[in-house]
Amino acid sequence: MFSLYKVRGESMKPTLQPGDIVLLRKRPAYIGDVVVVDHVRFGIILKRIDANRQLIGDGPASTPSDELGPYKPSTLIGTAILAITPRGIRRLSARRSGIRA
């Protein structure tokens, strides 16, 4: 199953810019993946899963990971696989560790 998500805010800069569209795929997430989750405190957000299984943004404007807390698979809406930007379409590949988050 696939869905689209429009990037809001600047927390994922420089990887993603406000207004970019990401194609999500419903599949298990791995360390390094960009994911959209339904966060209990912040609602629907786009973040990356780091090596400690924490949700993080790629840029300094992101909410700190200690406030976001750990990634919970039950909150996963989708894993970002493509970014559609004004500069074109590009693949969003995780820094594959082979470790499921």
Image: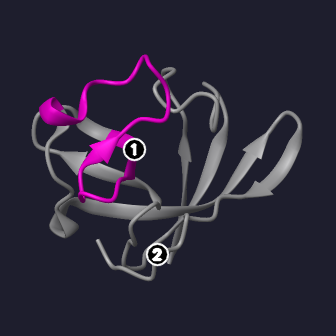
Residue 90 or residue 5, whichever sits in front: 90
The answer to whether residue 83 is left or right of residue 57 is: right
The answer to whether residue 26 is left or right of residue 2 is: left
First in residue order: circle 2 vs circle 1:
1
Q: Quadrant of residue 95?
A: bottom right
* Residue range corresponding to the magenta coloring: 45-67
| Residue 25, percent from left and from top | 51, 71
Tag 1's secondary structure?
strand
Disc number for residue 17 = none
| Residue 17, percent from left and from top | 64, 28
Tag 2's secondary structure?
loop
**Residue 50 belongs to magenta span:** yes
Amino acid identity at mark 2: Ser
| Residue 71, percent from left and from top | 21, 57
**Residue 94 belongs to magenta span:** no
Residue under label 1, please give it: 47
The answer to whether the residue labelled 2 contacts the one labelled 1, judged by CB atoms less than 8 Å apart, is: no
Query: Which is more foreground, mark 2 or mark 1?
Result: 2
* Furthest-right residue in this view: 87
17 in relation to 21, above or below: above
Circle 1: is it few (<14), some (14-19), or many (20+) Cα within 10 Å?
many
Residue under label 2, please give it: 97
Q: Tell me the quarter of the image containing the C terminus.
A: bottom left
